[in-house]
Image: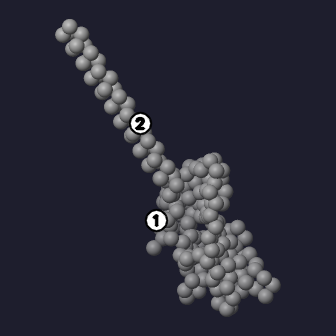
């Protein structure tokens, strides 16, 4: 009888310990997955691009595995000092991967309406480990966009490659691009902004 009671107690103790170990493993896996989700969803989202508060914001919740524009912000700012409010549109493209980007459209308000001067040249490229292209707007004393970027290649998402800096300025009704200047080899170009 004592042996049977002893056997039952040991068996219950083993079952209880197995249950606790399994429950702890599930908890750790859930916490680890939550950390991964937070890490992926915040990459590049907090880099200050120099724009003020937007005049309007549109958001869209994407379905599972759907990619596209998740957030659109519009800024009405006189960037060429002609007394008319020009328009900068900033769109966040979400991809369900660790890579995402912002796209900026710059439109000057002319007598003939708005004209796009950005021509798909103003964007960021954000990766899991390193941002390979970032930019900062400045409005004083004159409008300027500073872009620091690395060329994309097979290994460039998480390897150090040469970073370059160029600026965009408004001249007349054009957005003029400077020649790139080599800076240094780096992975995350955010670290090269002042």
> What is the secondary structure assignment of the residue under circle 1?
helix
In this figure, which residue is indicated by the disc labeled 2? 26
In this figure, which residue is indicated by the disc labeled 1? 191
Whether label 1 touches label 2, CB < 8 Å? no
Q: Relative to 23, is 11 on the left or the right?
A: left
For image coordinates 58% across by 50% down, the residue present is 97
Of 127 and 193, nearer the camera is 127
> What is the secondary structure assignment of the residue under circle 2?
helix
Tag shown at residue 147: none
Of 53 and 112, nearer the camera is 53
Q: Which quadrant: the C terminus?
A: bottom left
Instruction: Work out whether 41 lies above or below 24.
Output: below
Circle 1 packing at 10 Å, graded few (<14), some (14-19), many (20+), is few
Which is nearer the N-term, disc 1 or disc 2?
Answer: 2
> By what rule are the colours in the image chosen?
one colour
The image shows residue 103 at horizontal and vertical percentages of: 64, 66
Circle 2 packing at 10 Å, graded few (<14), some (14-19), many (20+), is few
The image shows residue 153 at horizontal and vertical percentages of: 61, 52
For image coordinates 67% across by 78% down, the residue present is 87
């Amino acid at each position: 009888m004592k042996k049977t009671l002893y056997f039952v107690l040991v068996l219950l103790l083993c079952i209880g310990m197995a249950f606790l170990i399994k429950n702890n493993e599930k908890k750790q896996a859930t916490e680890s997955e939550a950390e991964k989700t937070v890490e992926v969803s915040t990459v590049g989202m907090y880099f200050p691009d120099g724009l003020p508060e937007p005049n309007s914001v549109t958001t869209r919740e994407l379905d599972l595995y759907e990619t596209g524009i998740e957030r659109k912000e519009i800024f009405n700012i006189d960037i060429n000092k002609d007394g008319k409010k020009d328009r900068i549109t900033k769109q966040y493209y979400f991809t369900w991967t660790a890579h995402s980007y912002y796209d900026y459209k710059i439109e000057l308000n002319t007598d003939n309406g708005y004209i796009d001067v950005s021509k798909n040249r103003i964007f960021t490229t954000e990766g899991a480990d390193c941002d390979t292209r970032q930019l900062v707007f400045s409005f004083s004393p004159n409008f300027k966009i500073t872009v620091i970027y690395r060329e994309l290649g097979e290994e460039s998402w998480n390897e150090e490659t040469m970073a370059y800096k160029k600026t965009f300025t408004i001249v007349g009704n054009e957005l003029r691009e400077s020649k790139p200047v080599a800076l240094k080899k780096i992975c995350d170009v955010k670290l090269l902004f002042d």
